[in-house]
Image (spheres, rainbow, N blue to C red):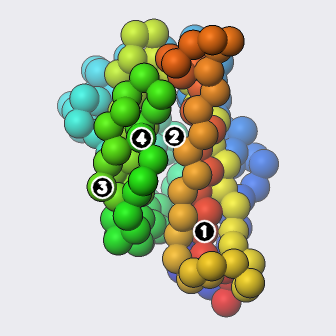
């Protein structure tokens, strides 16, 4: 997403993009349809998929506003940067596994959403760092689960991709 920011295109930060993406993951009926589409696709294995792989199948129009290569470049850069950042957070309250990197936690959380029965809805947000932030040229990821009262089983994932500061 760094290249996107340097080009001045905030394709992924618009409310139109966010609403279009979220329509594949929320409400539950939409998430169930997305799960079925992924299960029936020959282009992905839903049990081992990673962040960045399922969007071209579910939301090709939304992510390809600047071409599929643009999406792949941006996801690739984010994955490389998040793989270099250690993680200390568990997947969720009901899965105490602590993935080694932020990218591995992101993948585990996404897989949890799509592979749970019933699937767990998620909301996607994209923000951008500002110059005074720590590591302003690096991506970050915020993964926050919602839980029902008194439950350790998540009901919703709030996924926020934090892009590098615009240069």
**CA separation, marks 1 and 4?**
22 Å
Residue on which the image places disc 2: 59
Give neighbour class at mark 2: few <14, some 14-19, many 20+ (Cα, 10 Å). some
The image shows residue 81 at horizontal and vertical percentages of 41, 72
**CA separation, marks 4 and 3?**
10 Å
Q: Residue at x 52, y 77 (%)?
A: 138
Which image quadrant is residue 21 in?
top right
User: Which marked residue is nearer to the observer: mark 2 or mark 3?
Assistant: 3
Residue on which the image places disc 4: 90
Residue on which the image places disc 1: 163
Q: Earlier in the sequence, mark 1 or mark 4?
A: 4
Query: Is residue 98 left or right of 134 when viewed as pictured?
Result: left
Residue on which the image places disc 3: 100
User: Is disc 1 in contact with disc 2, using a CB cutoff of under 8 Å?
Assistant: no
The image shows residue 87 at horizontal and vertical percentages of 40, 57
Disc number at residue 33?
none
Residue closest to the far right:
15
> Closest to the observer: 133 or 4?
133
The image shows residue 135 at horizontal and vertical percentages of 57, 81
**CA separation, marks 1 and 2?**
20 Å
Dot 2 falls on a residue whose secondary structure is loop
């Amino acid at each position: 997403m760094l290249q996107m920011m340097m080009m001045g295109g905030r394709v992924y930060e618009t409310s139109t993009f966010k609403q279009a993406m979220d329509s594949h993951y929320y409400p539950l009926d939409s998430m169930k349809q997305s799960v079925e589409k992924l299960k029936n696709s020959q282009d992905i294995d839903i049990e081992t998929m990673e962040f960045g792989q399922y969007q071209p199948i579910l939301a090709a129009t939304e992510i390809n506003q600047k071409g599929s290569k643009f999406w792949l470049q941006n996801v690739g850069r984010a994955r490389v940067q998040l793989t270099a950042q250690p993680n200390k957070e568990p997947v969720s309250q009901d899965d105490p596994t602590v993935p080694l990197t932020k990218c591995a936690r992101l993948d585990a959380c996404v897989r949890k959403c799509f592979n749970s029965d019933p699937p767990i809805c998620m909301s996607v947000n994209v923000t951008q760092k500002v110059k005074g932030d720590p590591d302003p040229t690096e991506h970050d990821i915020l993964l926050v689960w919602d839980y029902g009262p008194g439950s350790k089983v998540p009901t919703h994932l709030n996924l926020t991709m934090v892009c590098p500061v615009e240069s």
